[in-house]
Amino acid sequence: MQLLRTTPLSYLFPQGKQLHFDELIVSAGEMVSLKGPSGSGKSTFLHLLSGFLPLQNGKVEVIGKGALQPKKEASPDWRRKAVGFVPQRPFFWNSLTVEQNLQMSAWAKKTDTLDSALEICERLGLSSLLQNKPSELSTGELQRLSIVRSTLGNAPIVLADEPTSSLDDINASKVLSLFHDLALEGKGIVFATHDSRASVASHRTVLMDSLIL
């Protein structure tokens, strides 16, 4: 069953550089890795899919959850119900504890409970840090916390930008195991990576260097 479907997309940067992306279809239960050299558009493509960058043409659809249209802002429901997003550089509010950050994200996504997120925290070795401030966490811990946050709201698609880049082998294995289990539950996972550990774990690889025109 198809979950995510795009038509060909392009993005023109203010400096004049333009990236073109072929269509992408992601099915339920599929992990897709995006590979290519720096500047090939992996992060840009994920930001287009997530609605953080506006589409200039084409269409992005999450089946049953709506679609992104050219030159229109993504609706708030897009990141509440359609996609979860893991940025390359995690951001959290340092005035709040880890648990309060998750509670705020749950509120934003109109999710009533943190139960599943707290279970994933346990799985990723973060449970002992819930009362810490984000500034007290390492880069790898923040990256794992960002992955936990992306699962709030139970969106069918998880988009992740270099989700294992700051992780040692043990924690990278935990994250990839989580992604596999989310795929087994019927989600689609799309992640950009330079990490061979992550690309080998994916079901399919899309080479982005061939998409620059």
Image (spheres, grey):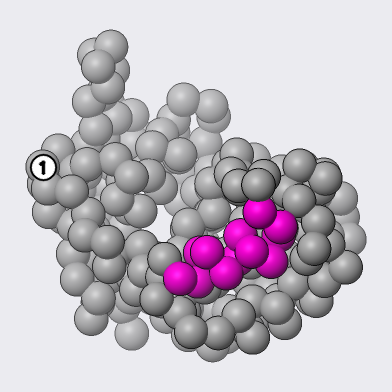
Where does residue 167 sit, x and y in percent of width and height?
Answer: 80, 49
At mark 1, the secondary structure is loop
Picture quarter containing residue 184?
A: bottom right
- Identify which residue, 118 or 88, lies in the foreground: 118
Q: Quadrant of the N terminus?
A: bottom left
Q: Residue at x 64, y 86 (%)?
A: 115
Side of 205 where 46 appears, left or right: left
Residue 107 locus on image (x, y percent) = 46, 71
Report the residue at 14% width, 38% height from top. Answer: 56
Viewer-nearest residue: 188 or 142: 142
Q: Does the magenta stretch include residue 190?
A: no
102 left or right of 159 in image: right
Residue 53 sits in quarter: top left
Q: In this view, does 41 lie above or below 153?
A: above
Farthest top residue? 15
Query: Could you say where residue 68 lies in the image, as x and y percent from the top left?
Result: 18, 57
Pick out the residue farthest to the front. 95
Residue at label 1? 71
Residue at image location 10% in from the left, 42% down from the top: 71
- Point 18% across, 64% down: residue: 67
Residue 95 at least partly seen:
yes
Provide residue 26's location: percent of width, then percent of height. Answer: 38, 68
Is 37 on the left or on the right of 6, as rendered? right
Question: Which region shows up in magenta?
Answer: 96-107
Q: What residue type is labelled 1?
A: Lys
Q: Is residue 184 above or below residue 100?
A: below
Q: Taking the image as drawn, is residue 164 in sight?
A: no
Main SS of residues in magenta:
helix
- Residue 123, image quadrant: bottom right
Q: Is residue 184 left or right of residue 80?
A: right
